[in-house]
Image (tube, grey):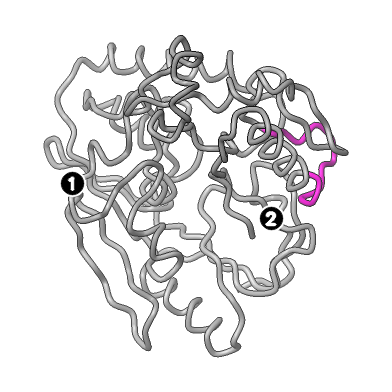
Amino acid sequence: MDENVSLKEHSNYRIGGPAKFFVRADDAGSLWAAVAFAKERRVPYFVLGGGTNVLVSDDGFDGVVIKPAIQFLETNDMMVRVGAGVFMSELLEFVAGRGLSGLEWAGGLPGTVGGAVRGNAGAFGGETKDAVKEIISVDVSGTAPKVIRRRGAQCAFGYRNSIFKINNGKEIILEATFELRKGDAKVIRETIEQKIQYRNERHPTEYPNIGSIFKNVPVADVPKELHGAFAHVIKTDPFPVVPTAYLISEAGLRGTRIGGAMVSEKHPNFIVNAGSARADEVKLLIGQVKSAVRKKYGIALEEEVLYL
């Protein structure tokens, strides 16, 4: 276990102060040991995946940051078993090379498998839950660790949500098993590359960022009198939604800055680190965006960001 570790190096935002304690955990035992350490000292703990949806405080974290580093990839016919610490890009390379289809939608998706499962990550009409066969996690809420196996249907997957997110740190994901299908390896690779190219063209990858700041807005949550006005932009994600990027753009917020934090010109649902941004600047800008969209449309945006 290390002390006073800068979390900037573990965040896609390149923002944040130090963690008082930092540990890489490569199995259930070391995960539990880190949690037990935090409990003994009566300090909080936080499980950090790829750092792709987390805004770290400028003051850092006065507790234990646990980074799961469970790294393995195995296949048995069309079943792929993968450790929670494996990056999605590594998983895609692995399955594409074996002609296994079902995760192409995740081309260019940042972060780890554990993070994708926890938040039921999705894009291009696909979601993580669509291919989940089984998830193994460890319940760390008691006086001893308890390993839990769940079938996909038992994980309470919802829109960017799951039972692991609902339980909020009480469970830590250890591994996932995905059930895929046979496909043409060349076509699978081409499809993944198309998704990566789409992201590179339309997302502000030239700046440090943590992906979409807000969830898209389900049509069911949009005031009925606005349905007609939004009809031309509604998309399936995986159910009908109004893209939040459209709402932010129409509110005239593209390029809006507070210090080093900026609403992306390219994709306004991204707030980027345009130059030595601080966490408090990002928070202020998030608040400004929410206020402007609420004032213009009466819609309350919901953040995807975790605050540390």
User: Could you tell me which residue is drawn at 48 percent across and 27 percent down?
Assistant: 108
Percent x, y for residue 17? 77, 59
Q: Secondary structure at mark 2?
A: loop
Tag 1: amino acid: Lys
User: Could you tell me which residue is drawn at 37 percent across and 41 percent down?
Assistant: 159
* Residue 65 location, quadrant: bottom right
The residue under label 2 is 56
| Left or right placement of residue 52 versus residue 13 in this view | left
Residues drawn in magenta: 271-281
Percent x, y for residue 256? 80, 27
Dot 1 surroundings within 10 Å: few (below 14), some, or many (20 or more)?
Answer: some
Tell me the number on the disc at residue 133.
1
Comparing 58 with 287, the one in front is 287
Q: Quadrant of the N terminus?
A: bottom right
User: Could you tell me which residue is drawn at 23 percent across and 25 percent down?
Assistant: 101
Q: CA distance from mark 2 to mark 1?
A: 32 Å
Tell me the number on the disc at residue 208.
none
Magenta segment includes 118: no
Tag 2: amino acid: Val
| Left or right placement of residue 138 versus residue 251 in this view | left
Magenta segment includes 279: yes
Give the mark nearer the N terminus: 2 vs 1.
2
